[in-house]
Image: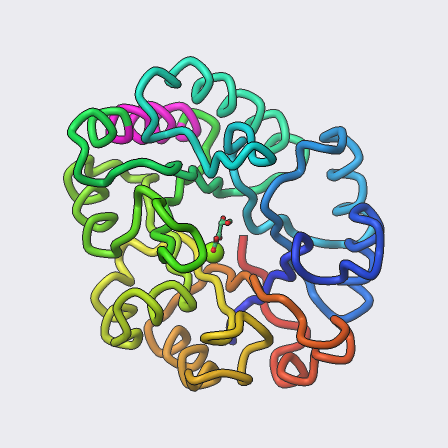
Amino acid sequence: MPRFAANLTLMFTEHAFLDRFAAAADAGFRAVEFLFPYAHPPEAIGERLRRNGLTQALFNLPPGDWAAGERGIAALPGRFADLQAGVETGLLYAEATGVARLHLMAGLADHDDPEAQAAYRRSVAWAAERVGRAGLNLVLEPINARNMPGYFLDDFGAAAALIAALNLPNLKLQFDLYHCQIMHGDVTMRLRQLMPIIGHVQTASVPERHEPGTGEMNDAFLFAELDRLGYDGFVGCEYNPRAGTTEGLGWFTPYRDGGTAQ
Ligand SMILES: O=C(O)C(=O)[C@H](O)CO
Ligand SMILES: [Mg+2]
């Protein structure tokens, strides 16, 4: 039975961010994820988790200037010091929340540019080693070009090749089912092939990025496949509710009160 994590950046937006933790717990979630916690003190996030009996499944390391259009800085030459500072900030929130994995975004850069490739490899290797010393995994997520034009990490094969090349025990793949379908298709076979390096999974319907079961994929089949493959991590619900978060949770009913993955 997959352990689903409500994505509080996209779900329960009927509430202020710090009130979404209670809303997710009331809806039956036992875990949450979000993009960025940095607008709030780490203690406030940790307190909401404890108060609502929630596990923090994932969040992203600081992405640079998101409002200005940056989507990560790991592949941007000349931003290594910012990358290092961002990892230290992320680790403060990791300590407050007990999260076991952090997502490092690559940024908008030409994936064929040797300087961007070198910057990214350096950033990933350093960040993985640094978060590893705190007992955490670092996950890398390929993102499709329709949602994020120009994103550096835009291929599952490239992500898997870098993870293999660096061969770090805590460097894993963030397998977003939504992106895989859009970029490559053949989702079940890629899950089977890449399962040994998967550190986090996310779900959303394709093409609209709404609730599971509302798009072209048989999402329930994929969730059962994760069970068949022995995946014991979280599945982040990174979708935009079609019409009200709670109203759209019918898909979740068979999975409510999932397990206790860390
Ligand atoms: O874009 C996605 O799918 C993600 O999971 C990133 O972390 C946020 O954009
Ligand atoms: Mg995702």
At 25% across and 76% down in the image, what residue appears?
186
In the image, residue 14 lies at what x, y percent? Answer: 82, 61
Q: Is residue 184 magenta?
A: no
- State which region is magenta: 120-132
**Which one is nearer the viewer's eye here, 9 or 31?**
9
In the image, residue 9 lies at what x, y percent? Answer: 66, 52
- Location of residue 258 (image quadrant): bottom right
In the image, residue 63 lies at what x, y percent? Answer: 51, 33
Q: Is residue 108 left or right of residue 41?
A: left
Q: Is residue 85 above or below residue 4?
A: above
Q: Is residue 124 magenta?
A: yes
Q: Is residue 203 above or below residue 36?
A: below
Q: Is residue 234 left or right of residue 248?
A: left
At 42% across and 13% down in the image, what residue appears?
81
**Which one is nearer the viewer's eye here, 232 or 42?**
42
The count of marks equals 0
In the image, residue 105 lies at what x, y percent? Answer: 42, 39
- Location of residue 229 (image quadrant): bottom left
Provide the major secondary structure of the magenta segment: helix
Q: Is residue 41 left or right of residue 81?
A: right
